[in-house]
Amino acid sequence: MQADLTWVHESEGHPSAILFLVHGTFAKPSNWTNSGSQFCQSLLRLLGPDTSIRCFTWSGKNSLGAREKAANRLRGLLIDSVARFPGIKHFVIGHSHGGNIALKSVASPALAEVGIVCLSTPILYGLERTTLTRSNNFLFFILSIPAVGAFAFLLTLGHADWEGLLWLPTAFLISLPVAFVLGRSRAGAEIVAKEMKVPGHGRDQVLFLRFVGDEASLALSTFQALQYVINWLVRAMLGIFSAVRRTWNWVGEREWLIPAVLVPVFLGGAVYGFTSVNLWWLGIPFAAALISVFLLVSLTPILASFALLTSLLSVFVGVLPFGLRLALATMWIEVCVESSPPGQWETIVLVPPSQFPASGLRHGFCYQEESAIRTIVKYVKEKSHVIKGASATA
């Protein structure tokens, strides 16, 4: 027996079915996978004592890496069991993120007939940011060497000595590691988005079972709503900068505007220098252009800092539900929480009983409520019939 696999119940003779139970995040060990739990006892009572039940134990850490590692180990155990018991139906029943481990572990041609039951499993899906939501790419421009250098140049305006000019090379040196970290962060987010994708399975191979009002789904959806708010704030800042940039592009496309601004300025200066006429108002266009340049350069680092702070806020909010690595990736990808992967699946949503006899949170109703257990048993029996029919045909 492997160290991460526990025999909850083993049939005396040839097993009629083999069930692998996988606990969720922060649930090591988990009571519902024990031999004396209501879940296991009900399965044996409804499926028969010749059913073998095994508990797969993993670290329970809230990270993509921990779940990927657990899925690889479970896949090896399933392949060994299928080879040892050919023709015997196998099922993986995973709760919460244990369902994600189950989905990834069965992603092998050798396990195409293994059934999967996901209990209250939050399906995470990473979306590449569209043109409107790709706001954090703005950080690359904002925190680039020229932008930070321009901000440092503004700081030197109040210093006439060489000591004040040291701000400029300091800003360049600071911007280099910032740009490097942002680049690595975006590259890592692209890898995370690929790791989040759920492997393809047959429509009838997976059953998604959940209860109305699941607290875990509510918490993850709340984070997703916060992401929308943060994205809106960053897009608003991007819109301000884009408006200024579009204005300058508009001016640049009309070359006649430059002499239209400079000629009156020089003309007014010449008249003022050689006569007693005060034509200060001719300098208004030049002053407006100078002020706009100042605002463009000064607002750049301010908007950058605010954009960076809001992005870091999304990271801090996402650490608890998603883990650090996935939370960091939310700066570049949009994480969505769904009840099932994209496509057509068999999903059953149950209503909690009015008396709430189950203990704890509704997130655990799927392994406590008799109605949920009977739904699982029905799926196991129907899947077993399909497998037997396919074996007989073959």
Image (cartoon, helix red, strand yellow):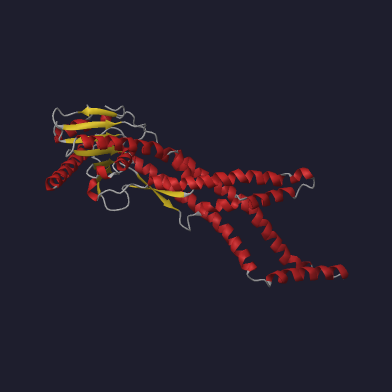
- Tell me where residue 44 sits by quadrant: top left
- The residue shown at (34%, 29%) is 28
Q: Is residue 85 above or below residue 342?
A: above
Res. 164 image quadrant: top right
Q: How many discs mark residues in the rendered view?
A: 0
Q: Is residue 82 visible in the rendered structure shown here?
A: yes
Instruction: State which quarter of the image contains the N terminus.
Output: top left
Where's residue 163, x and y in %? 77, 42
Left or right of 32? Residue 197 is right
The correct choice, above or below, for 306 with respect to 33 in the image is below
Q: Position of residue 338 (x, y in %)?
A: 34, 48
Residue 11 or residue 313, whichever sits in front: 11
The one nearer the camera, 28 or 215, is 28
- Residue 32 in sight here: no
Where residue 142 appears, x then y in whole percent?
A: 59, 52
Residue toward you, 79 or 11? 79
Q: Is residue 219 left or right of residue 167?
A: left
In-front residue for pair 369/323: 323
Residue extending furthest left? 392
Please give left or right for residue 298 compared with residue 373 in the image. Answer: right
Q: Position of residue 82 (x, y in %)?
A: 22, 37
Q: Is residue 320 shown left or right of residue 213?
A: right
